[in-house]
Amino acid sequence: MDLEIKNQRFIVCGASSGFGRAIAEQLLTEGAEVIAVARREQKLDELKDDFPEKVITVAGDLTNDDTHNEIEGAIGNHQLHGVVINSGGPPALSPLETAIYDWDQAYKNVMRWKIELVLRLVSYFTSKDYGRILFVESQAVKQPISSLVLSNSFRAGMVGFAKSLAQEIADQGVTVNVLAPGSHDTPAIERVIKKAAKGTDKSEEQVREEMEASIPVGRFGKGEEIASLAGWILSPHASYVTGQTISHDGGNIKGIFG
């Protein structure tokens, strides 16, 4: 399928690795242009080397206003067609392992900057009566994950924001959706595996095998698989899909609306 996004311009946050890198590569392969944002400049430069005419890099901390300013500078006078709001998760902690400091930091790293950046960018879309806003969160928004209370809490809050925003701007040609990925074979899964193995007699490899066996399809997902779905959601083909939280979890969510 032709996604019809050739020469469209997208911002992809967290583009140095994991979901962000996979989505950026999917969009670029389809002929789109990408403003790739992440802290690791070397990784962004590698992406630019692969697609030299299509990538603009912004190396910086997404919780910093200066990075948001650089993103707007990279947009310039060009039309912006979509944004992927994505970053790593907070530390793996259970409720009683947290202190209020952990909650303050998780709010800053998981929720605050996303809302601030999207509020900055909304007018780029509404002024053209077209746009795609996609949040990459976690299956935790549908089924809380043990020892990830910070992620469970703040990512659910992001779904509330996304759903509310979707309702407000749907009649202006702008869609707002959430991807809720389950366990994928990306660097982010390693912190979950390490946490699960800690204090047990199991090796990290044993924990990994047990986690994969617990997923109905019997394996972790692949970055390119979720990127394919993201590419469609970000395309003109998805103009009637908004306000949705879409799982990509190998059948792991047990609820009927998973």
Image (cartoon, grey):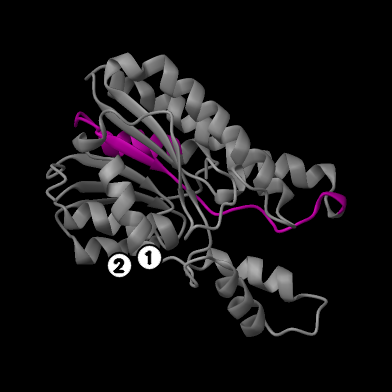
Q: Which amino acid does label 2 sit on?
A: Glu
Residue segment shown in magenta: 68-96
Cα distance between the residues tagged 1 and 2: 5 Å
User: Residue 133 at what x, y percent from top left?
Assistant: 37, 34
Q: Mark 2 points at which residue?
A: 46
User: Residue 4 at what x, y percent from top left?
Assistant: 13, 42
Q: Can residue 112 be seen in this view?
A: no
Describe the element under mark 1 as helix, strand or loop: helix
User: Residue 223 at what x, y percent from top left?
Assistant: 38, 63
Q: Do the residues labelled 1 and 2 touch (CB within 8 Å)?
A: yes
Describe the element under mark 2 as helix, strand or loop: helix
Q: Residue 43 carries which label?
A: 1
Q: Which residue is drawn at 26% across and 16% down?
A: 127
Q: How crowded is mark 2: few (under 14 residues within 10 Å), some or many (20 or more)?
A: few
The answer to whether 218 appears left or right of 81 in the picture is right
Q: Is residue 235 visible?
A: yes
Decide: is 200 above or below 224: below
User: Residue 113 at what x, y percent from top left?
Assistant: 54, 36
